[in-house]
Amino acid sequence: RIAWPSPLQTPTVWIDALQSKKTWDCAHWPFVQRLEALTPQILEEVLEVASSFSTAYPYLARGGTWQNLFLFRGHEWNEELCTALPLTCRLLRPELPSKPGVPFSTQFNEEVVIFRSEPGASVGAHCGSSNGVVNLHLTLTGAEGTSLRIGEEDFPLTDRKAVCFQDSFFHAVEHRGTAKAERISLVIRVMHPELSLEAYGSAPRTDVVEDLKNWDMVGELEREVARLREAYRKLVSDTAFPVANMSDSVAGSCAVTGAAPCDVR
């Protein structure tokens, strides 16, 4: 028996311990503010891979063009796309998983997807698979003439501004035919802020974890630390200056500032 609180929320997986809110304060996820500030640079990268978009969820489209592009899905990054969108992936890789050590409720508990729609597109009302997911929906461009309906409330979209809402609520998108431009949004699906091992209560398993009773949280955290270390090593390797150039740079700085000691041999 699933204890859905209302017809506005009917996900397949329901976790009783989690608070239900249509929208959440995006400040729960500090990296969202950074994404908003860097919207122009992210959009520039996305436009370079525009030919990679494909039709999004055709069973939900009620008309017009609606497309998507997944950067992160099924716990895996699309490395080919990340090569083409280095800034976007560099900003997001450290943020997922959003709650290290906490078991996923479904296979697609956390994802990064870019949506594109053209004027006249209409996306039917739908809800996510679990109430343990919050969508961080950042409109990169084309917000004018587009609205996001969550539950029974319409939220006009704004360029460079995120709307953070619980995926379990029915939601829909209308990109009115009178709009003048395509709309592109970056959506990061993250764990509900209150999701924890304890929140699963007496549940024996999830769609992803076969045995919650013997869940190894310490082991999961160790693996996440190892992943972050490896990502940091790669970042340093990709951005490090050659030693000779670094010495020249330091020497030049010393000559200008007169700083001491200044031995760069």
Image (spheres, rainbow, N blue to C red):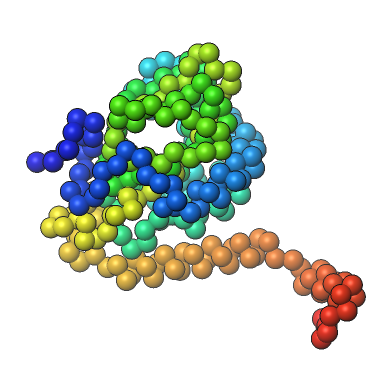
Residue 112: x and y in percent read: 45, 43
Q: Is residue 40 left or right of residue 186?
A: right
Question: Considering the image in quadrants, where does the N terminus appear?
Answer: top left
The one of 168 and 158 positioned closer to us in this rendering: 158
The one of 102 and 37 positioned closer to us in this rendering: 37
Residue 9: x and y in percent read: 23, 34
Identify whether 42 is placed above or below 52.
below
The one of 153 and 41 positioned closer to us in this rendering: 153
Q: Is residue 164 left or right of residue 260?
A: left
The one of 217 and 179 positioned closer to us in this rendering: 179
- Residue at the spot x=34%, y=50% of the render? 191
Residue 34: x and y in percent read: 56, 50
Identify whether 203 is placed above or below 39.
below
Farthest residue to the top: give it. 178
Q: Quadrant of residue 256?
A: bottom right
Identify whether 103 is placed above or below 172.
below
Question: Considering the image in quadrants, where does the C terminus appear?
Answer: bottom right
Residue 119 in view of the camera: yes
Q: Is residue 238 left or right of residue 1?
A: right
Residue 263 in view of the camera: no
Residue 111: x and y in percent read: 41, 45
